[in-house]
Amino acid sequence: MRTVLLDRDGVVTINRKYNVKSPAELCLIPGAANAIARLNRERVAVALCTNQPEVDEGIIRKCELDAIHHALQTMLARHDAWIDLILCCTDNFHSERRKPSPGMLFEAMRHLGAKSADTPFIGDQPSDLEAAANAHCRPILVRTGLGRLTERGSIPQYARPAAIYDDLSSFVEACCH
Ligand SMILES: [Mg+2]
């Protein structure tokens, strides 16, 4: 495993009812920063692939989203962790980049020189699992964020998770021992 692709909300940061609209609303899921630091030390590239349609919807501006991601990297840096690539899809309509479409995941793998068969995409919603399957990545579900709901709900057969972990930390612990 050379590359790990991550959803943001519900995997790295705590979900907000109306999404994260400012750096002040940003809160890391316990253990996520240390898990990312471990991946960094193991020289596994880490990319975020996040849908942020609130930009198209006019709820936040792109520069505010950039400020949120800058703040995220600063918070991670306190744990000696960093994300190598942050991709976001700001479309509020069906597009090639918006999950469950695979465009953003392909873009991340292209940028990082990753092969899909060797690359997990870790998310908490059915659209993450579908995007992973559509990109021929390993769909991994975590129980943080909306993950428990997803686990109990209906997931299309083709996007069934290859594995389910309690959180990002458990995934990293299992994969980097
Ligand atoms: Mg999510």
Image (cartoon, helix red, strand yellow):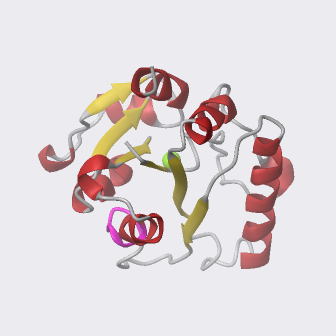
- Look at the magenta stretch and give its main secondary structure: loop
Name which quarter of the figure residue 90 lies in: bottom right
Tell whether 103 sits left or right of 7. left
Tell whether 88 sits left or right of 14. left
Residue at coordinates 29% horizontally, 30% vertically from top-left? 163
What range of the chain is rendered magenta? 98-104
**Magenta residue check for 100:** yes
**Looking at the image, which is closer to me, 2 or 74?**
2
Kindly tell me whether residue 62 is visible in this rendering.
Answer: yes
Q: Position of residue 45 (x, y in %)?
A: 52, 51
Q: Which part of the image, by quadrant, shows the C terminus?
A: top left
Residue 166 position (above or below residue 2): above
Residue at coordinates 35% horizontally, 54% vertically from top-left? 127
**Magenta residue check for 124:** no
Q: Position of residue 68 (x, y in %)?
A: 77, 60
Kindly tell me whether residue 52 is visible in this rendering.
Answer: no
**Looking at the image, which is closer to me, 40 or 5?**
40
